[in-house]
Image (tube, coloured by chain):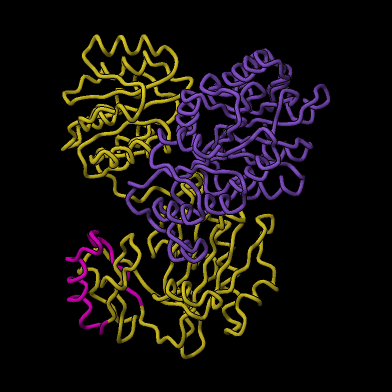
Chain colours: A purple, B yellow
Amino acid sequence: MILAGRETGVIVTGATGRQGLFHIQLMNEYAREVGGVGVVAGVTPGKGGKEAAGVPVYDSIRAALKEHDADASVIFVPAGAAGDSIMESAANGLSLVVAITEHIPVHDTMQALAYARLCGSTVIGPNCPGLLSPGEAKLGIMPAQLATPGPVGVVSRSGTLTYEIVDELTRAGIGQSTVVGIGGDPVIGSTFTDILARFEKDPATKAVVLVGEVGGALEQEGAASTTLPLVAYVAGVSAPPDKRMGHAGAIVEGGEGDARSKIRALEAMGVTVASRPSEIPALVRSLV
Amino acid sequence: MKLREHEGKRIFADAGIPVPAGRVVQSVDELDDLSSFGDRVVLKAQVDVGGRGKAGGVVICGVDEAPARAAELFSKTIKGLAVSELLVEECLSIAHEYYCAVLIDRSTRQPVVLFTEAGGVEIEETARQDPDRIRRFDISPLLTELPAFAVRDLVGPAPKALGPVVSALYRVFLEKDALLAEINPLVVLDDGRVFAADAKVIVDDNAIARQGFRQNRDLTEREAEAERHGFSYVELDGEIGVVGNGAGLTMATLDLIEHYGLRAANFLDVGGGADRERVAHAVRLLAGSPGVRVIIVNLLGGITRCDEVAQGIIDAGVSQRVIVRMAGTNEAEGRALLTEHGYEMYDSMDRAVGAAAEVKV
């Protein structure tokens, strides 16, 4: 188990919106089931004093922390204000920030991540489903019923495709230590490399499933950084060649970032690559 | 969203980056008075593809020949795209071509500024064979200006007049929410003046609204409808329509279709909250595409209500074969509804796609 556990207290920002309300309820149902702390407070500016799905709402994270102990935030704030919410979390000393919000302008993300790093906070996302350690903690929107505790870490750029793979593992009797959705945006707070470094230090994680997509080279960088047994899957082999980012993308990333060249690079490193999600359980079993 | 060259140049000019004198024309008739351009002009097709010059989209000619050469360009397709606009520019007498770009490096999560003396069409070749010739500066997004030392390091032995262009390009990148701001070539003339001879600016789609840009893409009827419903939609040329939720899962479904030797007709991600109405819209949209023989619906999510999805498929009532894979709340009710109306439902995507390929999985 990495990043969060039963003892992790969570503040949800954007608590009074439809998504916020719904997922506070699901996160706290899960916390009750596993005997964890869960969501202790919600934050929505201007809605202080109200209640959201059974937790008190405050105008700011600062105000919430006067009344509650918390280590982490989960962000459901709309895109235009989500960068600010990441920075508010970091400035108030929360060590883990899980940004669920999608469509955040990437310049806002870059700035918020740089500031969070100065504050020493770890950011997961944005545009991600969050994380789930079966039997321990759920920070985000992953469907908990698909997962089961066990020795395999899952780290993925995708949302629903992650659920698909967790479901395949569970059906095959292979449990998960922690499932982390790192997000599908071009700029994200924690990369494969960051999450794999945490799995490496986690005695409960014996192998990792890495789920990638087209674009960038984060998959290869992650695979090169770890000694853990890895099974990778990269979605997008049938995708028509992506519209390239001028010449500059090729210069910085050194390759095309398409699925096939990514798979070739991973295989050249000795990583086992599944050609479809349903192959993953058997490949994991062959490694562990 | 990629801006056209002339839109990019307008932004450059506003930011103090010199651009050649020029104007945009939509027809040959608008080329009547070119006397202000001198003896020779450059005609540049405004199409949204790279490698335009190599594909014959840029013509340098005498002012007298310009109407005839423009007519040729208007009748051409460049990498499959019709030419609807030309940028007519003064012809520069170039002494040297440089290259400058600002973009985002996903690995460092920061902007990076690139500069090289080896500008021009062979820039990618240079990057591969001689990467040391490209200087780079990684800049913290907490800085709103390129520091002076960074500009000096980037420009190096090149003419100092290029420094202000590099600084201004970084400001354009920040102020316009750009994913990429690129000048290739950035030229120095025989008389020492500096110009951005081309402009490539890609604006973050998530910032188009706050930047006040309008989408400039020409959409097909179905693409426009998909956009109205908030679907992420790409047309392909196969026979299997695909509705999925989430980009990764939808992409994986397309991959599986290829794996079974079939060809997808599209990529359609309905996004979060696939309810009855959205599913019905999505299925109808695909059923209206020519050549779609089978529609595969692959929806997964803890909070998807399968009875709602089933109802949406039944509402759509399309004539093509519809194969459904879904998992979530009320799965049994959804299955019962679909079976009652004669639709197939499978519990794994392998089985669903296999069924379309008539393969038992």
Give the extent of the magenta segment.
B61-89
Residue drawn 64% across the image and 73% down it: B151
Residue nearer the viewer, B212 or A101: A101
Taking the image as shown, residue B68 lies to the left or right of residue A142, namely left
Residue B213 lies left or right of residue B175; in this view the side is: left
- Position above or below: B36 against B3: below
Q: Position of residue A128 (x, y in %)?
A: 55, 36
Q: A146 above or below A283?
A: above
Q: Is residue B212 magenta?
A: no
Q: Which quarter of the rendered picture does the N terminus of chain A lie within?
A: top right
> Residue at 50% across / 42% down in the picture?
A231
The residue that appears at 60% across and 74% down in the rendered structure is: B164
Whether B85 is among the magenta residues is yes
Looking at the image, is B229 positioned above or below residue B49?
A: above
Q: Is residue A77 visible?
A: no
Where does the image place residue B247, in percent across and percent down from the top left? 42, 38
Viewer can see residue B320? yes
Residue ranking furthest to the right: A66
x, y (%) of residue A27?
A: 62, 20
Residue reaching furthest to the bottom: B190
Number of dots carrying numbers: 0
Which picture quadrant has residue A97? top right
Image quarter (top left, top right, bottom left or bottom right) of the C terminus of chain A? top right
Task: Name the residue at 65% across, 13% down.
Answer: A33
Side of B179 relative to B270 (left or right): right
Q: Nearer the viewer, residue B357 or B97?
A: B357
Q: Position of residue A157 (x, y in %)?
A: 51, 41
From the viewer's side, name the closer residue of B361 and A159: B361
